[in-house]
């Protein structure tokens, strides 16, 4: 079943085409990896889908509903969660409070929201840190905080921007395991990731972008051998 | 799993018995205070403390909770003052009804000016509120219908009257009136700070984009905070008008009200439920005693001392005097 269908999505900033006619589909329950060199338009694509940037044209169909151009909070309430590349924890509040704010999106009862937040904090394996302020947590822990906070809103689709970016090597495997475990919660995931090995490991499909355009879409094996993708990453070899 | 179970068995809020008794004891003392035979001046001082604690708390809701700096909050004080006096002077309507009218008008005004203004962020919102505050004063100075620059003189009743909220023989009834509003408004703030709304307002303040990503309508929440804040300010204007029995634009729409609400809150602890009270307990006695020793307006000595205190606080304890309290107690009483 298709959960998200993006068609001809475009956005320019001034004369620069940040995203140009991007189309793809995401199947319910899968993990879609988005790759591309810096400036390829990956984060812009996330912002367009989640409403943080107004798209110029195209359509975004989530569960048969057009969410093109809606406000971010409306899109979130429909069941599309996200994390940010540049982390945005509520720094002066505890981990538990951060996640509770997410839980309050669907639940008004304090106790129910708290217990749900705790269950999710356990899922991201930070239970013992629940009363720590967000500003006291390490980058890896804050990534987990953002994931937990987004999960607490009960998203059907979760967009994760750079799960392993900026964390030390030791922390990466745990985060990757966590993304894989999301499948078990019935959450469909789109993830931006720079580490090709990780993308190939966790993704069912991969979307490759370069200079604002889609250059490839397919299962990881196809992408690995796709000439356009190789060129985009390694640069075209000119006869120089 | 048992770990999760024990975490879920924790109380929602750690209540500290000692603090609870301290707060209850404090309020019991306030209730009994007039029986101790305080002087008229001391009662006046307490009334000023209650009033300033509330106007600062009102400011704290928008400034501390939702993070928008308002410099025109005196406008809501003035609206409250005029609402009671105008309807009493013109139609003989009891000021009690005037208090309610003031609160409703303030909510409507806050929503109407909040919708366009809260789209402005940071300094721009502050500047816009400053201008709104000033323009209210100018409008009321020229508006003949409400007495223009000379204002409204509330006709005095021959004896003390609860209906007209006028007490000539003693300040004690005023003391209790202000105490009741002080208690209610601090209680409401305390409830909000622990509620879903409180959590969501803090989220909006700390990071609007992250809040949006969690389904929070940022604009709506800022307007709610602005309206609640305005509704808390209004009854203080109403009661103050009943206390001095004259309303005029220079007194009731005084820019100083907007500024003092901000200063007290920042000094006491912005974003903390008890911050405005702490700030008030320091500044208001300082101001009132300076008035005694130096006459008239106190020779601005209170403001000089205050300026020094504020500088020291801003350098060493930027989150206010209340942050001298130990962390575990603070955490419970915070909005931040």
Image (tube, coloured by chain):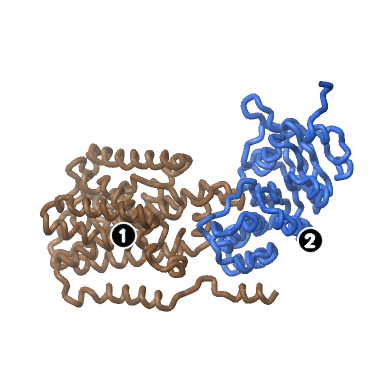
Chain colours: A blue, B brown
Q: Residues within 10 Å of mark 2 (few under 14, many from 20)?
A: few
Residue B8 is situated, as x and y percent measured from the top left of the image, at 62, 73
What label does residue B279 carry, if any?
1
Q: Is residue A135 left or right of residue B78?
A: right
What label does residue A13 carry, if any?
none
* Camera-side residue of A50 and B140: A50
Q: Say which residue label 2 marks.
A: A184
Asked which secondary structure carries label 1, the reply is helix
Residue B231 is situated, as x and y percent measured from the top left of the image, at 37, 54
The image quarter in which residue B129 lies? top left
The single residue placed furthest to the top in the displayed view is A240
Residue A94 is situated, as x and y percent measured from the top left of the image, at 54, 62
Residue A66, relative to residue B100: is it above or below?
above
The residue sitting at 31% across, 46% down in the picture is: B75
- For the question of whether residue A72 can be seen, the reply is yes
Q: Residues within 10 Å of mark 1 (few under 14, many from 20)?
A: many
Residue A38, relative to residue B179: is it above or below?
above
Q: Is residue B141 left or right of residue B328?
A: left
Whole-number angstrom distance, CA of label 1 to CA of label 2: 52 Å
């Amino acid at each position: 079943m298709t959960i998200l269908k993006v068609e001809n999505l475009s956005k320019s900033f001034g004369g620069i085409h940040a995203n140009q006619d991007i189309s793809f589909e995401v199947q319910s329950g899968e993990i879609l990896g988005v790759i591309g060199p810096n400036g390829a338009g990956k984060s812009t694509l996330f912002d367009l889908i989640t409403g943080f940037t107004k798209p110029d044209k195209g359509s975004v169909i989530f569960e048969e509903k057009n969410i093109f151009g809606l406000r971010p909070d409306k899109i979130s309430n429909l069941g599309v969660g996200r994390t940010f590349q540049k982390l945005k924890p509520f720094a002066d509040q505890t981990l538990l409070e951060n996640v509770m704010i997410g839980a309050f999106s669907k639940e008004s009862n304090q106790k129910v929201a708290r217990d749900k937040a705790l269950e999710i904090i356990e899922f991201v394996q930070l239970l013992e840190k629940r009363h720590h302020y967000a500003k006291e947590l390490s980058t890896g822990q804050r990534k987990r905080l953002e994931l937990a906070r987004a999960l607490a809103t009960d998203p059907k689709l979760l967009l994760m921007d750079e799960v392993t970016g900026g964390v030390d090597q030791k922390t990466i495997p745990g985060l990757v395991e966590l993304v894989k475990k999301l499948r078990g919660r019935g959450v469909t995931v789109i993830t931006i990731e720079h580490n090709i090995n990780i993308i190939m490991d966790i993704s069912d499909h991969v979307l490759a972008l370069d200079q604002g355009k889609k250059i490839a879409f397919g299962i990881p094996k196809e992408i690995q051998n796709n000439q356009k993708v190789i060129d985009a990453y390694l640069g075209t070899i000119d006869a120089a | 799993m048992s770990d999760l179970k024990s975490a879920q068995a924790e109380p929602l809020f750690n209540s500290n018995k000692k603090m609870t008794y301290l707060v209850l004891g404090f309020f019991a003392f306030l209730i009994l205070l007039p029986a101790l035979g305080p002087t008229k001046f001391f009662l006046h001082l307490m009334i000023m403390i209650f009033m300033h604690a509330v106007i600062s708390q009102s400011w704290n809701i928008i400034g501390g909770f939702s993070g928008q700096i308002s410099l025109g909050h005196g406008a809501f004080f003035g609206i409250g003052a005029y609402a009671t006096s105008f309807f009493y002077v013109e139609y003989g309507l009891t000021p009690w009804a005037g208090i309610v009218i003031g609160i409703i008008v303030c909510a409507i005004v806050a929503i109407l000016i909040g919708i366009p203004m809260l789209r402005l962020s940071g300094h721009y919102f502050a500047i816009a509120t400053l201008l709104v505050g000033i323009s209210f004063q100018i409008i009321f100075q020229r508006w003949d219908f409400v007495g223009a620059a000379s204002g409204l003189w509330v006709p005095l009743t021959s004896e003390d009257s609860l209906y007209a909220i006028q007490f000539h023989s003693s300040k004690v009834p005023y003391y209790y009136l202000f105490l009741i509003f002080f208690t209610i408004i601090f209680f409401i703030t305390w409830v909000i700070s622990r509620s879903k709304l409180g959590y969501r307002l803090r989220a909006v303040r700390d990071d609007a984009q992250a809040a949006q990503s969690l389904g929070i309508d940022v604009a709506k929440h800022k307007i709610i905070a602005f309206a609640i804040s305005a509704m808390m300010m209004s009854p203080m204007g109403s009661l103050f008008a009943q206390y001095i029995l004259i309303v005029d634009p220079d007194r009731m729409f005084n820019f100083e009200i907007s500024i003092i609400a901000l200063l007290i809150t920042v000094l006491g602890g912005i974003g903390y439920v008890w911050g405005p009270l702490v700030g008030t307990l320091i500044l208001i006695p300082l101001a009132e005693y300076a008035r005694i020793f130096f006459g008239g307006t106190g020779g601005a000595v209170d403001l000089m001392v205050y300026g020094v205190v504020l500088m020291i606080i801003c350098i060493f304890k930027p989150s206010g005097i209340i942050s001298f309290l130990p962390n575990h107690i603070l955490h419970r009483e915070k909005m931040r």
